Amino acid sequence: MIKKSVVGRVDALLKTDLFSSVGKEKLVPICENHCQNKTFQKGKTIFSKNTSEKCIGIIADGTASVKKERVVINHLKAGDIFGAVTLYNDCDRFVNDIVAQTECTVIFISKDGIDSLLSRSPEFAKKYIKYLSQRVYFLNEKIEEYTAPSAKDKLLSYFKKNAVDGSFVLNEKMTELSKQLNISRASLYRAIDELYDSKKIGKDGNIIRLL
């Protein structure tokens, strides 16, 4: 009989795009032999530059942030994955910090488990390559944001890339957003005003509309 904890892991993995093409019969032995669950309290470090074990993590519940020094690079929610980019890298350390924003449960899969899936499931291998390609694209977008010539250009680029149907919900703290864009809070507020005055954006409370 399959343990309840294993069933929970399988169900969580099947909800992700990366593992969605892997049949349950292939995931069960992976979840039995190569997985473990860990729960982290808010503010605790999940992964850091001191982490040396080769594995990937899947957020099963809660949210976390990806940080480079004090700058927030990305936000992770249930179903999101981290560690896949560095799993087959010669570097023996993780490159960023993953910090729990809320109480967070993470499923860790060892490199041996991923090796097994890659060798047994061509569809998983394709999904893995697709995921890595998407991360390269994401990082290129981040480079564009950081190298934009002005705070206004950085902010407009950020809004455009993250808007849904022409609107962006500004639900991040200004301090976090300024760190993410690598600009001061004063520059951030000034950039918002400049974009509004030049009719690049419209504002309705915390909703930003691209014009």
Image: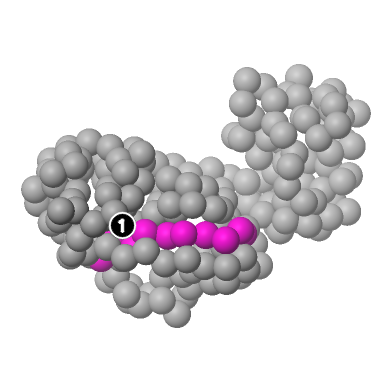
- How many numbered marks, from 0 up? 1
Q: List x then y, in percent, for residue 96.
A: 50, 66
Q: Residue furthest left?
A: 120
Residue at screen point 76% across, 19% down: 211
- The image shows residue 63 at horizontal and vertical percentages of 56, 53
Look at 48% across and 47% down and name the residue there: 78
| Residue 19 in the figure: left or right of residue 81 | left
Residue 167 higher or lower than 31, as above or below: above
Q: Give the percent coordinates (x, y) of residue 5.
A: 31, 57
Q: Mark yes or no: residue 89 visible.
A: no
Where residue 24 sits: x, y (%)? 19, 42
Q: Is 160 situated above or below 35?
A: above
Q: Which residues lie in the magenta part?
A: 101-110
Q: Is residue 41 visible?
A: yes
State left or right for residue 41 relative to residue 81.
Answer: right
The extreme front residue here reads: 1
* SS assignment at label 1: helix
Is 41 placed left or right of 183 in the picture? left
Chosen colour scheme: one colour
Q: In which quarter of the image is residue 36?
A: bottom left
Majority secondary structure of the magenta segment? strand
Residue type indicated by callout 1: Ser
Left or right relative to 101: residue 191: right
User: Residue 158: which quarter of the image?
Assistant: top right
Image point (88%, 54%), residue name: 186
Q: Which of 66 and 186 is in front in this view?
A: 66
Q: Quadrant of residue 91?
A: bottom left
Question: Would you name the residue on which mark 1 appears?
Answer: 5
Mark 1 is surrounded, within 10 Å at the Cα level, by few (under 14), some (14 to 19) or many (20 or more) other residues, namely few
Q: Which of 5 and 163 is in front in this view?
A: 5
